Image (spheres, rainbow, N blue to C red):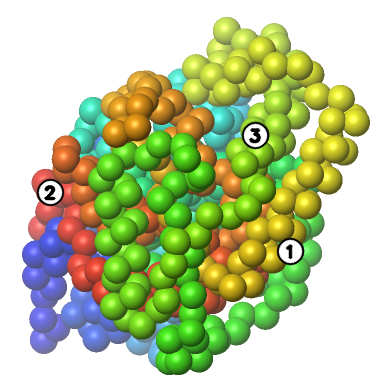
Amino acid sequence: MRRRLPLSPFYSGDVTLTQLSRLMRARQISPRELIERTVRHIDQHNVTLNAFVVTCFDAAREAAVRSEQRFADGTAGPLEGLPLTIKDSIDVAGLPTCCGSRLFAAQHAARDATCTRLLREAGGIVIGKTNCPEFLMNYESDNHLIGRTNNPWNLERTAGGSSGGESAAIASFMSAGGMGSDGGGSIRWPAHACGIAGLKPTPGRVSAAGHIPRIAHPGGLLGVVGPMARTVEDLRTLFSVLAQYDTADPFSAPVPQRAADLAPFRTGSLRVGLMNGWYDTPVQEAIVEAVQKAGRALQSIGLVVEEFRPRGLERAPELWWFFFTRLGARPFLATVEDERDRLHWTGVELFDQALTEEEPTVSAVLANLAARDQLRISLLRQMETHRVLLLPAAGATAFPHRTRRWPTPKGEIGLHQAMEPLTPFNLFGMPALVLPFGFDGDGLPCGVQLVARPYDEELLLEVGVALEQARGLFPGPSGYEMAV
């Protein structure tokens, strides 16, 4: 007789996508049992968290039956039977891709996005789509479709954005993992806010085909899709499924997956550059402490950790803002001018800020592209000695909904300053991941960020797993026990 899975692992903070997979392969829980428990858990907790835009429980149950057959046949995939979620900006066949807006609510996807298809082919079971701000244009997930997503650590705090529904669902055990997207921190900031892990890959390393809006030039220089889960070990599993060449993505490159070069680990020669923030922009004290603690943990496992202050990159956040917001603000708002009264504040807040600045000229675009390239070259050269960077995941922890100023020991910071540790790596097209590494005085998680050179995800993930193991288990938010 199969031993029933005890309840405690589901809420002790140590059940992960990887461990759930092991339990199913050991026949300690079946895909149908896991899906049913997940459905009950969502029914119980989504009422207060409001993470899901739409669920597909009946289809998930049918998929679980097929997963059980594949386990019986010995053909189970690497994600077999695992309940996964997809951000509302990524296509799932037959479901709406609303991108947080009522303007797109009637649009249903004819086919899966490439990443959705790959997850399913690996045996993953999609249980629903998760919330985001309108047009993905905010660091809070709120809209006119379903309203605001709340943080499972504190309902009065944001779960982040734009992948805030995804982070809340994963942190509260309503999902084992899933897909987000990141053009300015939108995977990493919600992961930090909710105490989970998230990977922003190199553009094109994970196909973004089937994302709305389409990730192509010029926005594809900044934006990517990537996995989110409770641990970096889980991210590594998801990345192994997702990192495939796709002709439908104009940024995709035929870069084969490869084993990480572990020689620097064994010889103690891998050097990590530690930054307490982006130059001198203030960061909350608990986050700096988390970075310092992570640095000591990396030293304890044999890595060389040294202070790192990049030279000549001060303009990076300004250039990111130019390409992410200023360049497209007027053209986009012109397309929705007749619908202005139907737009949500999350969709226009950043655009309205951009309208107060001069309209970009062709010469400004060309000059800023050239400047971006030179800054990127400079950073990559400086990282020849430090192949990995360690720095804050943001300047503040999960903030109260709709607030825009927060205290630090060196003075208040605003929204743009708080995101400065994140946005340069969108500008430069570099892989970066976030994992939790502590708490602030209010009991909110503090994440740290690891960054590597383009197409070096394998090394980045190995360092992340090593840091995670040195940290030990990270607890989940209380009150989210999985119901029997």
Picture disc at residue 134: none
Q: In front: 28, or 438?
A: 438
Q: Is residue 342 left or right of residue 265?
A: right
- Residue 139 in picture, x, y percent from top left: 46, 33
**In-front residue for pair 439/33:** 439
Asked whether the residues under the numbered discs 1 and 3 touch, taking CB atoms below 8 Å apart as contact, a structural biologist would say: no
Q: Earlier in the sequence, mark 1 or mark 3?
A: 1
Mark 3 Cα shell of 10 Å, populated few (<14), some (14-19), many (≥20): some
Task: Inspect this view and state whether residue 317 appears.
Answer: yes
Which of the image's four quarters has the N terminus?
bottom left
Image-quadrant location for residue 429: bottom right
Classify mark 1: residues with Cα within 10 Å, few (<14), some (14-19) or many (20+): many
Place of residue 468 in the rendered image (x, y in percent of width and height, measured from the top left): 31, 70
Per the model, the C-alpha gap separating discs 2 and 1 is 40 Å
Residue at image coords 31%, 28%:
407
Residue 69 quadrant: bottom left
Q: Nearer the viewer, mark 1 or mark 3?
A: 3
As displayed, is residue 145 above or below residue 255?
above
Q: CA distance from mark 1 to mark 3?
A: 27 Å
Instruction: State the residue position of label 2.
Output: 478
Q: Is residue 17 something one can see in this rendering?
A: no
Q: Quadrant of the C terminus?
A: bottom left
Which amino acid, mark 2?
Answer: Ser
Q: Identify the element where label 2 is drawn.
A: loop
User: Three-letter amino acid code at disc 3?
Assistant: Glu
Residue 318, numbered label: 3
- What residue is shown with label 1? 252
Rendering coords of residue 177 (x, y %):
38, 59
Residue, x 27% and y 61% (percent of image)? 293
